[in-house]
Amino acid sequence: MPIRSTRKKQVRRVRRVAKQPGRARLRPLKPIAPRRASLIRPEEINAVDVKIRTLDNGLRLVSEHVIGAGSVGIALYVDVGSRQEKRDESGIAHFIEHLVFKGTKGRSMREIMRSVESRGGMLNAFTTKEHTCFYAWTRTMYLAEGMDVLYELAFQPTFDAREIERERSVIIEEIHGIEDEADESLFDAFEETLFAKHPLAKPVIGKEKTVAGLSRSTLKSFHHKYYRPSRVSVVATGGHRHEDFFKLATELFSKEREPKEGLRIPSEKINYNTGKDATILCKGISQAHIVLGVPAPRISSPDLPAVQAIVTALGVGMSSRLSLRLREELALAYDTMAFYTPYSDAGCIGVYAAMTEEESGRGREELQKIIKNMIRKPISQIELDRVKDQIIGGMVLSMESVATRLMRTGQSEMYLKRYVPIEEEIAKIAGLTLSQIRTKTEEYFGDEKRLTVVSTRSN
């Protein structure tokens, strides 16, 4: 997903150099080469113990016990997103994610909202192009309450007709809100362009026309089709005990039966629509927003560590090439970033910047130059070592959060069907070579004709 950088006050170290008596000039110190990327120290990350089980109905359970954690995060993942929708169903997976919070067989809307929040925790959900996730974060002593409400949300929604109409209006307003956000609309338009007629091209939230036309029976049918045990994984991360989690999960989820009718999901080959140039009109904007991108590997690709390094060097943080050039040297843009968006069988990598419409032509040229310079002025060993430390440091710091651990473990479960220790990821980053990085940079950005460009213009 795109990672936005935040700016902090920077202080440049300088030294005074005497040139002539009574005169002096300031000269920046030479940059200090970073130390070589190092692996983590044992005390930097809490020890974990992971156990995985599969119930008789096919539902998978992943328990990650984090020693020293005082809270627990629970996530229920359903293997369905916008890519499973038919064109006239666009937005239905997201609609269902909203609707289940409006009432279940055991809880009213208010009872659902209070179930975790009243204990100081958090209950939420999100839909992506490939998955739907419901999650709770609470004190370890309330593990049972958190799991019970997640079970009801996934398997016992009522789909009340009046609530459907109310929520339909809310989602349509959400669509209007995204249309008013130029950067949100831009990334949707970029993937619609790059993935062309493939299901990945559809926006998760859907279109106003399709959301307006979804009936109660269609919603219930889609839910019954995809919310089945074999397509669900429940993940717990935190200070809970394995035996408590497995006992509660077995009691709750073993009640669900896999539908007798099989589920066939046709796979569609992705034909990337590269080399295109598109402009979208956005009302009331004061900036031009530009994305340039190309196809990239799937999330399970062995090239993933190299992609992370390339994206980081290109546009993650204030020291990245994008920020230094567009922001610090040219004062052309405030908001810049590089991004990598992976899916199970596809992906895209690119750059983004926002600037005044008057400077958009120059901004686009500079973005293209920066990409070209990834080939002409390839990443040096010093830059690569710095990038490795940046990525590894970010991974280590993110492990301080139970919620971040939960999402990381859940993503590994849904895409790889296994637990990936952070030490494994860090070792891959630390083992990257200059040759690997330069080969992959050439592979992604070597052919300028493959660049897909999408920009905004005010109307």
Image (cartoon, rainbow, N blue to C red):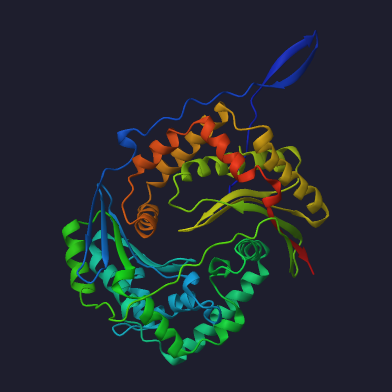
On screen, residue 410 versus residue 98, left or right, reads left
> What residue appears at the point 29 percent right and 43 percent down from the top-left corner?
46
Q: In the picture provided, is 5 more to the left or to the right than 120? A: right
* Camera sees residue 290: yes
**Residue at the limit of the structure toward the top, as seen here:** 21
State the image quarter where residue 23 is shown: top right
The reply, left or right, for residue 433 in relation to residue 368 is left
Residue 182 x %, y %: 68, 64
Q: Would you place residue 68 above or below residue 104 in this image?
A: above
Q: Residue at x 65, y 49 (%)?
A: 336
Percent coordinates x, y for residue 95 in the rendering? 48, 78
Asked whether residue 121 appears in the rendered view, the answer is no
Image quadrant where residue 279 sits:
bottom right
Q: Is residue 225 above or below residue 237?
A: below
Q: Quadrant of the C terminus?
A: bottom right
Please tell me which residue is depicted at 56% across the width and 27% down the height of the picture.
Answer: 382
With 200 as the anchor, is 450 left or right in this view?
Answer: right
Frontmost residue, 402 versus 342: 342
Residue extending farthest to the bottom is 161
Total labels drawn: 0
Looking at the image, the residue that sits furthest to the right is 358
| Place of residue 303 in the rendered image (x, y in percent of width and height, measured from the top left) | 48, 44
Task: Say above or below: 267 vs 35.
Answer: below
Residue 93: image location, x then y, percent: 46, 75
